[in-house]
Image (cartoon, helix red, strand yellow):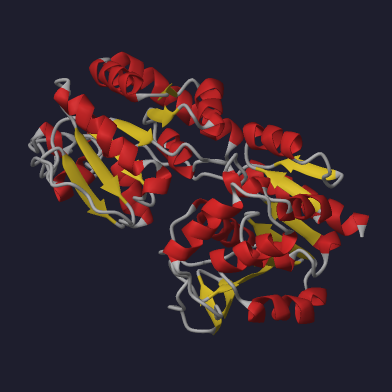
Amino acid sequence: MKIAFIVQRYGSEVLGGAEQLCRLLAEQMVAHHDVEVVTTCARDYITWKNEYAEGTDRIRGVTVRRFATARTRDIDAFNKYSDWIFNNPHSRADEMEWLKQQGPWSPALIEYLRRHQQHYDVLVFFTYLYAPTVLGLEVNPGKSILIPTAHDEPAIHLDIFKEVFAKVGALCYLTGSERDFVQHQFPQRPLLEELVGVGVDMAHRETYPRLPPPPDPTLDRREDGEEAPAEEDTGSDLPSHLRTRGSVFRRRHRLDGPIVLYGGRIDPGKGCEELLDYFGSFISAGGQATLALMGAKMMSLPEEPYLRFAGMLSDTDRVHAFEAATIVVCPSPYESLSLLALEAMSTGTPVLVNGRSSVLVEHCVRSNAGLWYEDRDEFVEALMLLLADDRLRATLGANGREYVREHYRWDVVLARYESLFAKIRHAR
């Protein structure tokens, strides 16, 4: 089957929920299908400036077709226009102007879909919000699938998105909370709707560095009865802090004691300003821990002794970071899935999440792998409790691993996608 994934940005260094989901899914499916990604030359979502070369590329076995954006975004002007359109009567033309100002605006991408859509069996669009989806769905709605990554935010109440959710051939939801919200928000929807989710690789639980196996007692003596020379012990004399889970990340970043970890875009829109504020209150209340931030820094960070910026990490280093973390915090109030929470659970690390996100609360309730907070006092109390109770953390961590194993293994998720693709082709 030939499948086109349409997404606003794409690349191994591009962070973002929909973008990361697209890349993970494309890399899994390329082993069984002819997968192409149709995207823009933009790397950052603030300006949509063309940074990648236009044309065809190949990333981890996936063919990537990039098209230039026709304009960059003036974020201040866009924010001002958004404030007006969300709070005043307006026309459909006003909403289309909002969509154009938001970006990415790439007429060449849409023209490519119009000319070549017949070569693809399925068109899969990632996230409802941007112009490539809104305009791209008009090309061939019947063979189009939308993974909306939807949550309650001002933009989703614009009338243009009623058309998006009504015309698409099928909808893929990542969580039950997202499905419930979309079904309440959009009464007119396609007949095909599936709760699919996303796959998460289960991290192997092992200490670092890897130590040699214990000696076999049956080999301790030579056949002549002489004692065999002792094997060189490459690990038993190492101090415990070098043989424990997460030691690689701790050594590299010179961290000791409890670690509270956040990963992803370090951005006010992801709740990071509030996280820094709340964590400062935790420290003022006598809490002792380091807040480690990994990912792309999109905001300034204060100079505090309890704060550590780890930067962009490879997939392997991210696993080491999750293993090193005492707790992983998910501060975003707007989530349609939260790969951060699922990755933490897959390593057996408990989570502390923003209770204003119904998706994050759903994960905690279904998994019994974390706690949630809705204000500063609840954040401080929950963090104090988790850090103080080793047995509680171990229980939550074990629950999280089982939750991911049962619901978010790649084989389970890919089977759901395959079934939906077959239904789309049969319906046509």
Residue 212 is situated, as x and y percent measured from the top left of the image, at: 22, 42
Residue at image position (25%, 39%) is 246
Residue 172 shows in this picture: yes
Residue 289 is situated, as x and y percent measured from the top left of the image, at: 18, 30
Q: Is residue 189 left or right of residue 400?
A: right
* Location of residue 113 (image quadrant): bottom right
Quadrant position of the N terminus in the picture: bottom right
Which residue is at the front of the view, 50 or 315? 50
Residue at image position (60%, 61%) is 26
Which residue is at the front of the view, 314 or 295? 295
Say if 24 sits above or below 222 in the image.
below
Say if 302 sits above or below 374 in the image.
below
Residue 18 shows in this picture: no
- Count up the numbered dots: 0
Which residue is at the front of the view, 121 or 371? 371
Residue at image position (73%, 60%) is 92
Say if 360 sits above or below 5 in the image.
above
Quadrant position of the C terminus in the picture: bottom right
* Location of residue 405 (image quadrant): top right
Residue 353 is situated, as x and y percent measured from the top left of the image, at: 42, 30
Residue 35 is situated, as x and y percent measured from the top left of the image, at: 66, 68
Which residue is at the front of the view, 241 or 209? 241
* Location of residue 183 (image quadrant): top right
